[in-house]
Amino acid sequence: MIRLEQLEKSVPLANGRQWILRNITLDVAEGEFLSIMGPSGAGKSSLLNVLGLMDHDWQGHFGFDGVAVEQLNPKQRQALQREKIGFIFQHYHLIDDLKVWENLDLPLQYRDVPAKERAAQVADLLDRFQIVGKKDLYPSQLSGGQQQLVAVARAVITRPRLLLADEPTGALHSTQARQIMDLLHELHREGATIVQVTHNEAFGSEADRVVRLGDGWIERSAGV
């Protein structure tokens, strides 16, 4: 699904450049569950932002489903992101003034899904994630674990080909974190391709493969 070849990212400094990603060559197979790990400042989130088409300031080759991302214009990249990629963030990024069901409905509106079909899909996700009773609450009325459940539901409601998770359990206590990881495994078994960034060694090792970054370089890539 994904092919990165000699991908690099840097930012200018007064006396040169600071490298964020260096010579990244990486394949991600369809249906794979990949963990990206490494110390703070290693480039993990920067790499995830590139994969999620949120950062376009890089050099090298990025192939996504056979399409060369570096050759796409901004509108084409946005369409690719909207159609094929879902995001889960550590701090949820829910819209505070929208109710739970409205947060789930919004991605479907962006894809021009008819209202009746949107309502059915939202109802299905609320039931599956066992948050039907929370549908009319606002994010501020939910616990951290409940907010992350809503965030995961929002990420998968459009059935993305690629699911990107940036520290999905980092802000949760152990029981809630385990629930989110179990949910990711369930989505993976159903065919989702998942790339997660995590500091948690135990959760990271639950993936099919771990890629370890250090100072922007891939130091090691191995199955677990």
Image (tube, helix red, strand yellow):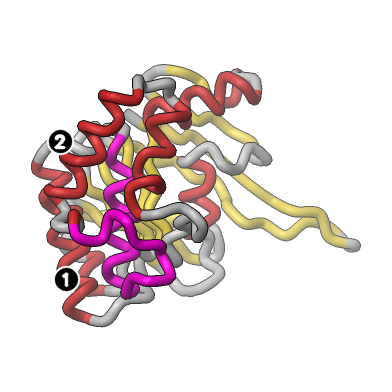
Query: Horizontal and vertical percent for residue 136?
Result: 32, 56
- Percent position (x, y) of residue 214? 48, 65
- Residue visible at 64% across and 20% down in the picture: 73
Mark 2: secondary structure: loop
Residue at 28% across / 24% down in the picture? 116
Residue 188 included in the magenta stretch of the image:
no
C-alpha distance separating marks 2 and 1: 20 Å
**Quadrant, the N terminus:** top left
Q: Amino acid at mark 2?
A: Gly
Q: Position of residue 42 (x, y in %)?
A: 52, 66
Please provide the residue range marked out in magenta: 133-157
> Which residue is the site of mark 2?
191
Which quadrant of the structure image shows residue 141? bottom left
Q: Which label belongs to residue 67?
A: none
Farthest residue, direction front: 136
Residue count near mark 2 (Cα–Cα under 10 Å), binned few <14, some 14–19, many ≥20? some
Residue 90 visible in the picture: no
Secondary structure under badge 1? helix
The residue that disc 1 covers is 178
Compared across the picture, whether 138 is left or right of 200 comes to right
Q: How many marks?
A: 2
Residue 117 coordinates in the image, percent (x, y)? 26, 24
Residue at left offset 50%, top offset 50%: 47
The residue type indicated by label 1 comes to: Arg
* Residue at the limit of the structure toward the right, as seen here: 14
Q: Earlier in the sequence, mark 2 or mark 1?
A: 1
Write down the quadrant of residue 168 in the picture: bottom left
Question: Which quadrant is the C terminus positioned in?
Answer: bottom left
Looking at this view, is 222 or 145 the one in front? 145
Q: Quarter of the image holding residue 189?
A: top left
Q: Is residue 150 magenta?
A: yes
